[in-house]
Image: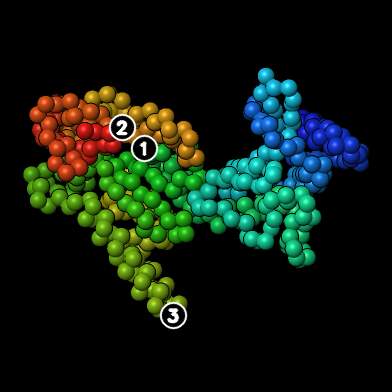
Amino acid sequence: RSEAIFMELLSAVHQQIRKHKSSMGARDEWKPKKRVRTTQSISTLSSNFHQPPMKYYSALLRQLEILQSMPEVSDITLHKSVSSPSGDNTTDDLTRISVTSSDKGGRSHTWHAELYPNVIMTVDLPAEFVLEDNQIKMDKWWEHGSNHATTSVKSARPLIPRIQTDFLQVLDKYQLLFEELDDLDSHLWILEPSLPARRCSIERRIALWEGGASMVIVLDPERPRGVPVLVRFMGVTLATMKAAASVAGKVANSNEKDVIDWRVSFARFASDEAQLDSTSNKQSDENNSGRANHICMNNGRWSEGRSVRENLELWFGSSLPSPHTTEKSDYLVECGICYAHRLPAEDNAADSSESSEGPLPEEKCSNPSCNRHYHESCLFEWLHSLPTARVSFDRIFGSCPYCCESVSVKILNGGN
């Protein structure tokens, strides 16, 4: 079946070559090993659209032959863009390509590229993708032979296979990051983003306790096991920390003053690691460095010798909520005004290249007997409608819809 699909692709490319009155008959015997597909999308072509030249399709065939022989490539798709049904002409331009390959961990990754007239790439990676060799010609690449001004063997590989090679090298660089994120996603309750998450997303909102208590962490792509570059606690109250401490047997129910704030305890847990790393970097002796790492592994501080999840659970004092032992509904909260968990994404978010998701209820009533959660926009609309609401600087103040406790929220754009 894959060979039949690929022969359909060849037929489409050869059709373009025949339109330019060129003969590529020898290519008809080409028998590929990889699955290659063509897809068709409807688009309105501008009046000044120019059909790619014959050299473009000839170069495309040669480079696809190399690409499909690369062992990591599992799927190649060439996309057809045709004119609007109401138009007079139909143009099968084959100017967009999608290539899917597997990394060393068996994860699937796809890069996309517009091939004509210039190469414009779209990748799903934690950082910007840049070709290793900046001398490669990205415009009118089919006219540059090997696409490079030098004659080195490494740079002689044509553009599209070079993109694939560099893409695989970048994937190798981020293997530890992908492993850490996959470990978090498979063992903990991730409230944001929705799973499976895009590979460019290095932020995770992790459930900590029932009732909406969670923490947001952003990993460092260059040091995935290091202290997260951002840590933020959400929905955490004294009652939450007291309940967690009581279950862990760390504090008596009546002894609230002994409850340690999670923000403070995490800062202490992570700060010693940073100080230790700073000291270790100044030590040239390997034994001293190894001894420092051993101390870090055993003194209850953050260590890159452990996974991110292991460090978080060491700080928390117990296993974090897991999909293997609990239900996600225990950690999801609904808005006390609209009764929804997540709001729909805004209309203008559809144009963003990032995965668009609506917000969660992140505002919370400070009354321990109430503890209602609200979406920021819902609470703003509620307070804005109250005749007794007052504004101070960039916040609006009013009463909780349920307990009349004072609540406030940041004034949103468009608020009066």
Q: Which of marks 1 and 3 is nearer the N terminus?
A: 1
Kind of residue indicated by mark 3: Ser
Residue situated in front as seen by the camera: 278 or 296: 278
Q: In this view, does 194 lie to the left or right of 49?
A: left
Q: Taking the image as drawn, is residue 80 in sight?
A: yes
Q: Earlier in the sequence, mark 2 or mark 1?
A: 1
Q: Where is residue 344 in the image (x, y as percent from the top left)?
A: 38, 28
Q: Rounded to the nearest whole Å, what is the CA distance between mark 1 and mark 3?
A: 43 Å
* Tag 2–tag 1 contact (CB < 8 Å): yes
Check disc 2 and report the residue beneath it.
Answer: 332
Q: Which of marks 3 and 2 is nearer the N terminus?
A: 3
Residue situated in front as seen by the camera: 137 or 224: 137
Mark 2 is surrounded, within 10 Å at the Cα level, by few (under 14), some (14 to 19) or many (20 or more) other residues, namely some
Kind of residue indicated by mark 1: Leu
Mark 1, secondary structure of its residue: strand
Q: Rounded to the nearest whole Å, what is the CA distance between mark 2 and mark 1?
A: 8 Å
Mark 2, secondary structure of its residue: loop
Mark 1 is surrounded, within 10 Å at the Cα level, by few (under 14), some (14 to 19) or many (20 or more) other residues, namely many
Residue at figure coordinates x 91%, y 39% from the top left:
23
Q: Position of residue 310 (x, y in %)?
A: 37, 52
